[in-house]
Image (tube, rainbow, N blue to C red):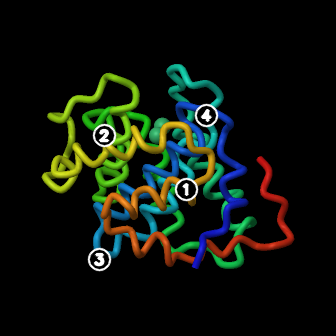
Amino acid sequence: MVPRRDWFTMQPPSAIHGLAHSARVMVWTTVLAGDGLLFEPALWAAACHDLCRETDDVDPGHGERAALWVIEELPRRLEETPEELDRIASACRWHAHPDRESGWRDDLLWLLKDADALDRIRLGDFDERFLRSAAARDRVGAARDLIQRTRRMTDPVDVWSEAFRLGLPIDRLLDFDFGLSSEEAPTR
Ligand SMILES: [Fe+2]
Ligand SMILES: [Fe+2]
């Protein structure tokens, strides 16, 4: 099934934190979750984590705003509220804080932060030592390739097709039904 694309029109129109970044972070949460239970909450957290950025510069409040958005807005956009909505919101909230200052410690947060970090290679300040899992460290080369190949893409499905061509295990992402409610205009 081809995922619904209109979800992504909600992403901020930014070359740095916009659609392609979110699409790649969704690839990495899928890869890092593997067959595990974190797949679905991590996918929603990846889709929403930078949705409420107001600037590509330092924006310390964007995690808190994303968390509020997840609680208040996300269920209205979907036919069914995702399970673990509070956990998805907490991951969004705390992703924008350093690990040591995090007021919430949860495997979902570490997975989201590693997925987000793998896409930091695009910013030039990536440091592998900050990755939290060996699974993420194993994907650094692939993350570099994926960024190079998808840098100019503007459609998430193109990004995911490229990830698939690279051999990344993202079948769960490609099969996922986002369940957007059809009558809701997907605008921010
Ligand atoms: Fe962020
Ligand atoms: Fe991000």
Amino acid found under the numbered disc labelled 4:
Arg
Q: Nearer the viewer, mark 4 or mark 3?
A: 3
Q: CA distance from mark 2 to mark 1?
A: 17 Å
Q: Nearer the viewer, mark 3 or mark 1?
A: 1
Q: Nearer the viewer, mark 4 or mark 1?
A: 1
Amino acid found under the numbered disc labelled 2:
Arg
Q: Which residue is mark 1?
A: 158
Q: Is residue 92 above or below residue 13?
A: below
First in sequence: mark 3 vs mark 2: 3
Amino acid found under the numbered disc labelled 1:
Asp
First in sequence: mark 2 vs mark 4: 4
Q: Nearer the viewer, mark 3 or mark 2?
A: 2
Q: Is residue 106 left or right of residue 90?
A: left
Mark 4, ligand 1, within 8 Å: the answer is: yes
Say the numbered circle drawn on residue 53. 4
Q: Which residue is mark 3?
A: 35
Q: Which residue is mark 2?
A: 144
Residue, x 48% and y 48% (percent of image)?
92
The location of residue 80, given as percent across then percent down, is 66, 78
